[in-house]
Image (tube, rainbow, N blue to C red):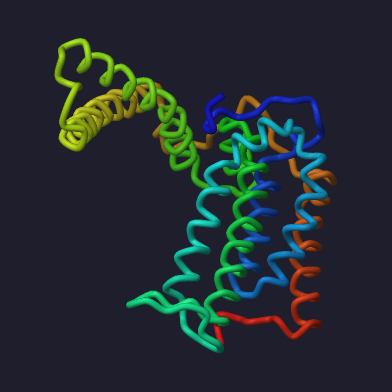
Amino acid sequence: MSVLTPARGTQAIFRINPVAKLAAALLLAGVLILTIDWVSAAVALACEFVLFFWAGLSLKAFALRTLPVWIAAPTAGVTTLLYGQAAGAVYWSFGLVNVTEGSLELAIATTLRILAIGLPSVVLFVTVDPTDLADGLAQVVKLPARFVLGGLAGLRLVGLFLEDWRALELARRARGIADHGALRRLLSQAFALLVLSIRRGSKLATAMEARGFGAPVRRTWARPSTFRGCEVALVGIGLAVALLAVGVSVATGSWNCVLT
């Protein structure tokens, strides 16, 4: 299962307009970015884990799809712990590395914040079909059709790029030039993929232009995209989680706004 392939299911979350999912994720992320404290991130993360039970993903699918977030969060936390701003008691010091009370608290807050922002974003967007997202952005958000369709076409090519990379790797191995020089092979293969991508993109742009996708006329859509009560409810849930996280953080005196 590729992390780029949308998940399928019959749960209500799969039928919600992707614009609502995007709004909920951005709303929650926007609030958590304003502060660096572990309380708000922990409260948001706790609420999110409760909501993940209705996300329509199995435990295996959830672990696979969110694996990059689970790797990135502790990595950023360890980096912050070792090289973050020194404050308070010093626990360990060696050269440029300073593990202090302040850097430890900052590392915990950074790790939890990445998880609180990344996990719901991944879970929401793996239930999104790119075509449904394009329909929503054009019909609900009223973005220019040319921009939306161009983005949709580019997103559809991501899977082909992965297949092209595997084909290039197999072709080079069949020619006997992929057995040594890993860095050189990587750079050469990346350049070949870039050339192939440019050619495919040019052909796709020409084909779309020939079919009238760039015409300056009012475009019609095969599938209507609506914003109903369930979409409003999802955005409301995102807002409620964000406000709860902020409220608990302020009440406990942990609020640490990055703008001040």
Residue located 30% across and 17% down the image: 167
Q: Residue furthest top?
A: 174
Direction from residue 18 to residue 12 in the image, left or right = right
Residue located 56% across and 28% down the image: 5
Q: How many marks?
A: 0
Which image quadrant for residue 256? Answer: bottom right
Q: Quadrant of the N terminus?
A: top right
Image height of 182 relative to 115, above or below = above
Direction from residue 156 to residue 226 in the image, left or right = right
The spot of residue 246 in percent (x, y) is 74, 74
Residue located 67% across and 49% down the image: 120
Image height of 6 relative to 231, above or below = above
Residue located 52% across and 80% down the image: 91
Residue closest to the eye, 17 or 78: 78
Direction from residue 24 to residue 233 in the image, left or right = right
The spot of residue 168 in percent (x, y) is 26, 20
Image height of 117 relative to 242, above or below = above
Direction from residue 234 to residue 69 in the image, left or right = left
The spot of residue 42 in percent (x, y) is 72, 64
Which image quadrant for residue 155? Answer: top left
The spot of residue 179 in percent (x, y) is 19, 22
Residue closest to the eye, 228 or 33: 33
Q: Quadrant of the C terminus?
A: bottom right
Image height of 233 relative to 95, above or below = above
